Image (tube, rainbow, N blue to C red):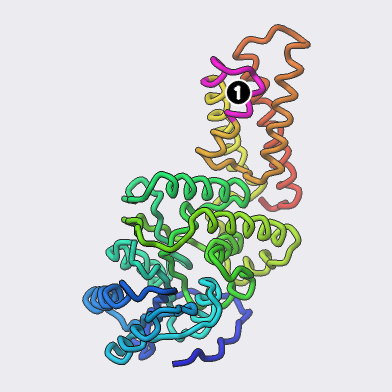
Amino acid sequence: MTLTESRPVLHQRLQRSPIDARMSLPVLDITLPVFNEEIRLEENLRRLHAHLTSTFPHTFRITVADNASTDKTLRIAERLARELPELMVVRFQQRARGNALRRVWLSSPAPVLAYMEADLSTDLSALAPLLAPLLSGHSDLAIGTRLARTSHSYRGAPREFISRGYNAVLRTVLGAGFSDAQSGFKAIRADVAQRLLPYVKDDGWFFDTELLVIAERSGLRVHEVPVDWAEDPNSSVDVVRTALADLRGMARLTRDLARGRVPVSRLRREIGREPTTPQAGSPWQGIRAVAWTSVYAVVFLLVRSFMDPLTSNLAALACTTFAARPPNPRPLTLGLTLLVSSLALAVLPLITTPGRWLEVAALAGASIAVHGGGYLAGRKTNPCS
């Protein structure tokens, strides 16, 4: 079966409603991007098909997107497709996960689209809660997270460190609200995908992170589901290389957003929901700034007992930013906070002999001043807030 032409992108206001499960077309289309998976593909496809047949109450389709495999992967998938009517196989000459997902999703007739890794590392019991908010119209995208407190993730220390570090950088640099960008267990409503995919440039591993960031910036609702996940010891994914590619993608997306390549304001008007988080310049942002600064000050006090003031300040800012998302996580705001607070701590000994509490007061005052400036700037650009 070949891919059809993608449907046109509409520009009227998106109206959300529960998915009509009575349609003859598949309600759900799950894509599995594969590359040289001949050893485990048949077993995993049969397991996924059996799970959907027994637990998913609506019509479905499983799309195997072969990314130029050089082994028997394609032949195995095509043989199974002749046996299982819900299975579809497409072949791509270019090895790129993002490209495969984009092309399959833009051509799929299903109103709910999903993807998962072919190794089925994520426990399939999380599939129903992943799809439910999309089927009901409550949410626009859904992701499985391995980093929630109630998740059970079994993986090596290096991969755990890289994953958590990457997501912390993503929250700091791009202000992402979702917790696990790299999880290979995600779903999206097709009407939302049609609006967002034209603005997602990455064709590789950064594809879904870019999609999520643009979705959040556009005012869409992202639902997170804690999942149980076990690392595949035979995985061919180079975690370090993938993380570096993601960091390059993050830098490129930051520039694109700053330059207005992605029409976030228009997307927010057309498909966004009513704001559910405090906007820049709102009174609640001021409360968050005070709370965040309090944590910042406490951490400073803790590390100040064995570090000098400037080093303690840097460590406290880094730890607080990592542990708790700042009210305004832009690099400029964090940089200004570090600069102003460091200047205050450096000047203080020239005026008096400072005690610990005076140092904390200077640091807290600098932080509130920086965030207060951002608050006032937000009020000027948001006069109705």
Up the image or down, 3 lies above or below 160; here it is: below
**For mark 1, what is the residue?**
312
Estimate how packed mark 1 is, as few (under 14), some (14 to 19) or many (20 or more) residues with alpha carbons within 10 Å.
many
User: Relative to 314, is 162 above or below?
Assistant: below
Q: Which residues are magenta?
A: 302-316
Q: Is residue 130 magenta?
A: no
Quadrant assignment, res 134: bottom left
Query: Which of 81 and 58 lies nearest the eye of the viewer?
Result: 81
Q: Could you tell me if residue 209 is visible in this image?
A: yes
Q: Considering the whole magenta stretch, tell me its main secondary structure.
A: helix
Say if the magenta span includes residue 311. yes
In front: 139, or 56? 56
Q: Disc 1 on helix, strand or loop? A: helix
Residue 248 drawn at (x, y percent): 64, 57
Q: Is residue 158 rendered to the left or right of residue 57? A: right
Picture residue at 47% right of the left edge, 52% below the top: 179
Where residue 156 appears, as percent x and y from the top left, is 38, 48
Pinpoint residue 265: horizontal percent, then vertical percent.
68, 64
- Residue at (38, 89) in percent of width and height: 25
The answer to whether residue 273 is seen in the rendering is no
Which residue: 62% across, 44% down? 329
The answer to whether residue 300 is left or right of residue 377 is: left
Q: Quadrant of residue 257?
A: bottom right
Q: Check the picture and name the quadrant holding the N terminus.
A: bottom left
Residue at point 51% right, 82% down?
A: 92
Q: Label 1 sits on what residue type?
A: Ser
Quarter assignment of residue 275:
bottom right
